[in-house]
Structure formats: C-alpha cells, structure tokens
Image (cartoon, rainbow, N blue to C red):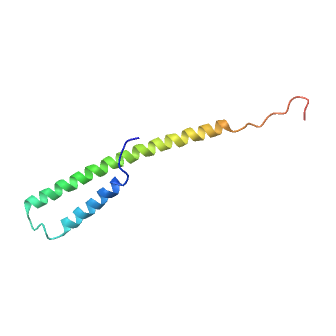
C-alpha cells in the first residue's frame, strides 16, 4: 500500500476551492503575474489530486483482490455434507 496522509485529498479540495474563489474575485484585475501564479497553483493542485486518485484506485484494486481471496477461502473452508457410509441409511 502506498503511503499518503489521510485527508490529503480533502486538503487539496479545500485548496482548490480557495483558488477558485480567488480566481472569481476582482483581486486579479488583469495582473498578469498574479494570474500566472494562480494558474500554476491550480496546476499543482490538479497534479496532487490526480496522484491521490491514482493512489485510491490502487487501494481499491488491492481491496478487491483481498475480498476475492477471502471469498475463495471461505468457499473452500465450508464443511461439505458428508455422504452416508454404505450400509447406513
């Protein structure tokens, strides 16, 4: 399993919301440097969210494999109904 701080995705979502609010505000007023910095920050958050999605996808695949293995083990571990011996009935 890859290591990632729990809640990292939530922190990235909150950061994206703050950046979106900043983009919608009138603080930029055509300031090219601020706009480029904002775009760079948004790209960084996007990259972080993509990595988090990749990590979650891998976790889901591992979990699915574990569930499949546990189900197979449970099926094979069930007691089978014993056949009566010949002469017993």
As drawn, 30 above or below 52: below
As drawn, 43 above or below 88: below
Farthest residue in the top direction? 86
Instruction: Name the residue located 33 percent from the left edge and 53 percent from the top edge.
Output: 8
> Could you tell me how many numbered marks the image carries?
0
Q: Position of residue 71 (x, y in %)?
A: 59, 41
Instruction: Name the residue located 39 percent from the left edge and 48 percent from the top edge.
Output: 56
Residue 70 placement, left or right of 34: right
As drawn, 43 above or below 86: below
- Viewer-nearest residue: 58 or 14: 14
Farthest residue in the front direction? 5
Q: Position of residue 18 (x, y in %)?
A: 24, 64
Residue 34 placement, left or right of 6: left
Residue 81 placement, left or right of 32: right
Farthest residue in the bottom direction? 26
Residue 40 placement, left or right of 8: left
Q: Quadrant of the C terminus?
A: top right
- Viewer-nearest residue: 3 or 43: 3
Q: Position of residue 26 (x, y in %)?
A: 14, 71
- Viewer-nearest residue: 37 or 24: 37
Q: Position of residue 29 (x, y in %)?
A: 10, 68
Q: Quadrant of the N terminus?
A: top left
Instruction: Name the residue located 49 percent from the left edge and 43 percent from the top edge.
Output: 64
Instruction: Name the residue located 69 percent from the left edge and 39 percent from the top edge.
Output: 78
């Amino acid at each position: 399993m890859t290591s990632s701080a729990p809640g990292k995705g939530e922190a990235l979502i909150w950061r994206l919301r703050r950046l979106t609010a900043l983009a919608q505000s009138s603080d930029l007023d055509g300031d090219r440097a601020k706009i480029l910095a904002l775009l760079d920050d948004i790209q960084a958050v996007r990259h972080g969210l993509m990595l988090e999605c990749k990590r979650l996808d891998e976790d889901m695949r591992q979990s699915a494999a574990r569930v499949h293995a546990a189900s197979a083990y449970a099926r094979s571990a069930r007691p089978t109904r014993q056949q009566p011996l010949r002469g017993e009935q």
